[in-house]
Image: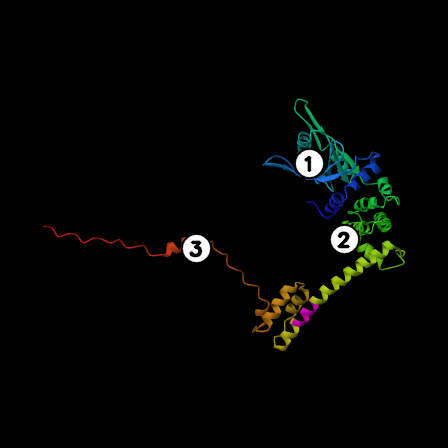
Amino acid sequence: MPGTAHEVLIVALRDRPALLSDLVERLTGRSLDAPIEVIDPTVRFTRAIEVRPDLLLRSRGPGWLMVEVQNAIDTRKRRSWPLAVSLLVHQEKAMGDVLVITASRRVASWAKRAAHHRGEHGTRLELTPRVLLLAGRRIEDLLDPARPELALFAAWAMHHRHGPAARRVVLRALELTEQHHDEPLREAQARAIIAVLSDAMLATLREMAMDPDKIPETAASRRFRLFFEKRGRIEGKVEGKVEGKQEALLAVLTARGLPPTDQERLQIASCCNSAELDRWIARAATAASTGEVFAPAPSRPARRSPAATRSRTSDREPRARKTTRPQKPAR
């Protein structure tokens, strides 16, 4: 299923289609016909068949652009890509391009031949997309001070990594982002870069950001530090709220002469569910024992439909007695 890294890149390309033109020009040396606009990505054949690529764009030329962001191999694309292209050619009356963006060499190799079909007697149907592989030397091409908007793609390519090389790319990408002259785009791109990073990468950067000796003080490092400080404040508030309720529950139990057992104390300390703690506190105010406080919530009986209720009611109703007419006396 698509994850955060997948969705962040799709949103960025949908909001700024010109980014795709910049990426294609940087990686292939060819530019797309401008302007580029987003169109409905749903491609329908019948009401029973619907193909929805990640992004569908139309440029000034007669063709179209189908964009697929591939984090992993998806065998369903073997059937859906040829179908989508056939329908688009029929619908738009022109051939377009399928662009596959990936950071995996394995996925790139698969994508080039995923939609190659051959019949038993030699008939061939081959769809070969243009693959934009964000790896190796291409990453350095995307870290260009003259084109800071391309830094998003370099950071996205590191979404599954957290080693020293990946950290260097991410920090450089954020530094270039901070140099963008457009403040709204700068803020949006910085948030997007942070959003695609793995938890392992964020944990490493958090440790480095809090130690000025590990990351020199720059606009990028300040952004990381502020990000982690804000997250820490939020997490601290949540943890403090839970701890306060745990202490309140213990205080109520002690005041009512219901000291919890060691097992129950451990149960309280390990509970981070604020709603569950609220239920225990409410019970502790009237419970006769700690067993009542920590008893599981009773399950609600399944609601019967009105039709079923009527049926059961009718089954319980006594049957109407047959009335017999008195027989006439024989003459």
- The span shown in magenta is 242-248
Q: Looking at the image, what colour scheme do you see?
A: rainbow
Q: Are marks 3 and 2 in contact (CB under 8 Å)?
A: no
Which residue is label 3 attached to? 309
Q: Identify residue type, mark 3.
A: Thr
Q: Where is residue 101 in the image (x, y as percent from the top left)?
A: 76, 39
Nearest the camera: 139 or 51? 51
Which residue is label 2 attached to? 199
Q: Where is residue 206 in the image (x, y as percent from the top left)?
A: 81, 57
Q: Is residue 208 visible?
A: no
Q: In which quarter of the image is the N terminus?
A: top right
Give the alpha-carbon distance from disc 2 to disc 1, as whole Å.
29 Å
Nearest the camera: 226 or 121? 226
Per the image, label 1 sits on a secondary structure element best described as helix
Closer to the chain start, of discs 2 and 1, is 1
Q: Which residue lies most toward the top here?
A: 121
Q: Is residue 35 magenta?
A: no
Q: Where is residue 275 in the image (x, y as percent from the top left)?
A: 63, 64
- Residue at 63 percent of width and 74 percent of height: 252
Per the image, label 2 sits on a secondary structure element best described as helix
